[in-house]
Amino acid sequence: MNEIQTVILSGGSGTRLWPLSREQYPKQLLALTGDLSLLQATAQRLDGFVAASLTARSIVVCNEEYRFLTAEQLRQIGRGTSLLILEPVGRNTAPALTLAALAVDGDPVLLVMPADHVVKDVAAFQAAMAFGVPYATAGAVVTFGIVPDRPETGFGYIRAVATMGDKGNPARRIEAFAEKPDVATAERYLASGEYWWNSGLFMMRASVWLTAIGRYRPDILAACELAHTRGKPDQDFFRVDKAAFTACPSDSIDYAVMEKIASGESGIAAVVVPMSAGWSDVGAWDALWQVVDKDADGNAVRGDVMLHDTRNSMVVADGRLVACLGVDDLVIVETADAVMVAHRDKTQEVKGIVARLKAAKRSEARAHRKVCRPWGWYDSVDGGDRFQVKRIVVKPGATLSLQMHHHRAEHWVVVRGTAKVTRGEDTFLVSENESTYIPLGVRHRLENPGMVPLEIIEVQSGTYLGEDDIVRFDDAYGRG
């Protein structure tokens, strides 16, 4: 039986799903359509697949900034043995796939899945994958085209006319790739029956991909080979060489290879398998509205939401009550530090707001008020010119780094659990309703030696309170 190596590309940022999606917490880590995040749902999408054997662990390529979040989400669903390849910078999908192909043993068929897609019909998804396996095993590059149900202008398209193989086999030979069309062109594509949405899902042997990328983008292959050769394991991760990968050109799988293969000059077959599986790349809030369950008035809600005379709207309340009266066709998203209100027809333009936030160096573009760390999380609940208040929760058995601050002192009040505190040369316990003080410039560490989460209130005071005022001397998570 053919062996399949699943490769999950988890490097996207999802700026059009702001304010839920942030640089440090991108959309694939969000649970947008159920209890699982998009990454977790992707990792489970081949559970029960019988058309081919799966390798023991998946390969996940992700940005090193959210490596611990990615690892923790995979651990929660029993995928803790996955190999996480860390990208120091984003370089699009072609280099990411090349890193994965260089990391495999032997020459398995790679099933390449973006981590940020929604698939509602898993059985139909697996059936399409099964049709693709024989072609990929024989040396073809296979992609999966979504059967269009509307003249969509937000997706690229694949044109394929002639069917391949026996009657009933849906696979077709790819004629061409098409960019995102205008409305009139999208309507023509839909009417012709010759076009499918480009899903970004691929299947091919590792050797086929390396041959193709070496032929069409030898600069990408060379940079990735150097980054991989100079890379090294780091706990549960594999870190590629930062300098070598930073020098790698950025390009997508489509532009770097697929469009050239489709021209027929390479001798590599380019095959598309049509798929109708309730797919969406949830690239914007309106796309998410299309695939989630809605009430009789066309509204999709999550969280503490109250509606009156509201239709065809999406409302997400992340913390507070959101009440809507007499509105139509809106997207309203509330988080602890930002509220977005947009017409559903304008949700593709949210990335412009994110660009303005970045230009103004505002933290709302980069991180949520609640920030996850490998040891737990903290929430910046208040702040002023010379003070900041945080709620800090440390997981049982977890330890923060031994560190020091140049510009701030800290007061810690334990409200739940017991803290083990290192302050200078002293180590002592602080119990509930007790407090301690960390002077400016003193080495210190916070640990949770107990079996329940440790919760403290931290009050920082000083001339500078930024997160970059941390000098780490020892860290269990490999942070410098």
Image (cartoon, rainbow, N blue to C red):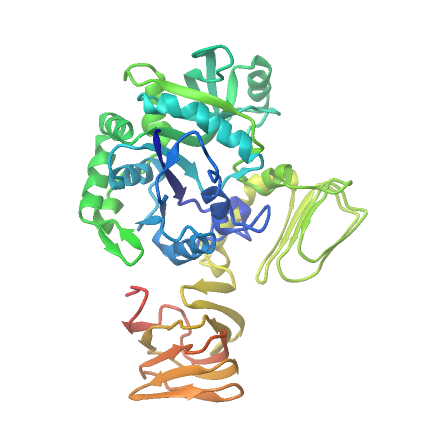
Location of the C terminus by quadrant is bottom left
* Residue 260 x/y as whole percent: 32, 21
Say which of 19 and 12 sits in front.
Answer: 12
Provide residue 279's location: percent of width, then percent of height: 55, 33
Q: Seen from this angle, which residue lies furthest right?
A: 309
Q: How many marks?
A: 0
- Frontmost residue, 408 versus 77: 77
* Residue depicted at x 39% and y 26%: 133
Q: Is residue 406 left or right of residue 293?
A: left
Residue 245 left/right relative to 12: left
Residue 370: percent from left, percent from top: 51, 64
Quick check: can you spot residue 197? no
- Asked if residue 139 is positioned above or below residue 446 in the image, the reply reads above
Residue drawn at (45%, 84%) of the image: 411
The residue drawn where x is 23% and y is 25% is 215
Is residue 61 visible in the rendered image? The answer is yes
Q: Nearer the viewer, residue 145 or 471?
A: 145
Which quadrant of the structure image shows residue 304?
A: bottom right
Query: Which image quarter holds the N terminus?
Result: top left
Percent x, y of residue 471: 30, 73
| Residue that appears at 39% across and 41% down | 9
Q: Examine the rendered structure and indicate whether residue 410 appears above or below residue 73.
A: below
